[in-house]
Image (spheres, rainbow, N blue to C red):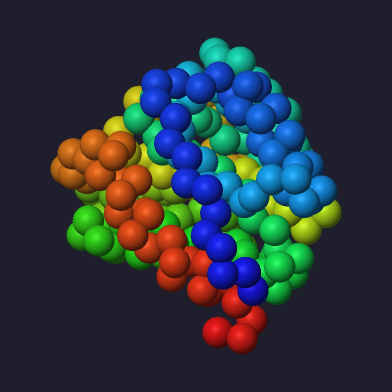
Amino acid sequence: MTDQSPEWRVSPGLVPYREALSAMEQRNAAIAAGEAGELVWLLEHPPVYTAGTSAALDELLDPRFEVVEAGRGGRYTYHGPGQRVGYVMLDLSRRGRDVRRFVHGLEQWVIATLAGFGVESWAVDGRVGIWTRDIDGSEAKIGAIGVRVRRWVTMHGFSVNLAPDLTHFGGIVPCGIEEFGVTSLDRLGIALAPGEWDAALHARLDAFLASLDPKG
């Protein structure tokens, strides 16, 4: 376990997805080579559909936006304005080398942060993402999880729907799960500025990092 906290970076505006993917791959390689420190990067993208390594073409229903192969696990995901994306680049060779523990830690980090705003959410075995109750009482996705690990350094991470245009999700079967809808904090009646979300997430960073320690 390392005692050094990762760099915390927040990018203003909208960062094109391909630009972010290139920067993330470069940082991943630099961390693995011992030339750069770990990084947690918060940002938003212009509208884009990203394809994971398990994406099925018949789940791309209406490619109204650019489609980019992301290299992460999972299927199709939408990113766009109003959705907060967190790219988490950690060196698991110094944090226990346990990918499942890392994914679980990401899920619990998002769940705990949502709870701070009064939103109960949960993870479901066999169904990727973060789930909550929509305004009609049905179960709906409020966050996505997708990771890649190369040379024990993580890439990608999570996204949380603060106030995106939910109709944009209609162009895909989100994460290959068509029997459940997608919701957002805004749809649930919670108006939240990105900075408020970021601050609440940062306040729980140490707890997330501690959860990765196999001795914890």
Which quarter shows the N terminus?
Answer: bottom right
Q: Is residue 146 left or right of residue 97?
A: left
Task: Locate residue 200, reporting x and y percent.
Answer: 30, 54
Q: Is residue 43 left or right of residue 65?
A: left
**Taking 120 as reference, is 55 above or below it?**
above
Q: Is residue 28 visible?
A: no
Q: Tell how many labels.
A: 0
As drawn, the residue found furthest toward the bottom would be 215
Task: Locate residue 38, reporting x and y percent.
Answer: 62, 51
Task: Locate residue 72, reporting x and y percent.
Answer: 71, 42
Q: Is residue 165 left or right of residue 89?
A: left
Residue drawn at x 44%, y 66% as measured from the top left: 206
In-front residue for pair 111/151: 151
Residue drawn at x 41%, y 44% as measured from the top left: 160
In-front residue for pair 61/165: 165
In-front residue for pair 43/124: 43
Residue drawn at x 78%, y 42% as measured from the top left: 29
Task: Locate residue 112, reporting x and y percent.
Answer: 35, 64
Residue drawn at x 57%, y 58% as measured from the top left: 127
**Taking 166 as reference, is 36 above or below it?**
below
- Can you tell which quarter of the image residue 69 is in? top right
Which quarter shows the C terminus?
Answer: bottom right
Q: Is residue 200 visible?
A: yes
**Taking 175 as reference, is 153 above or below it?**
below
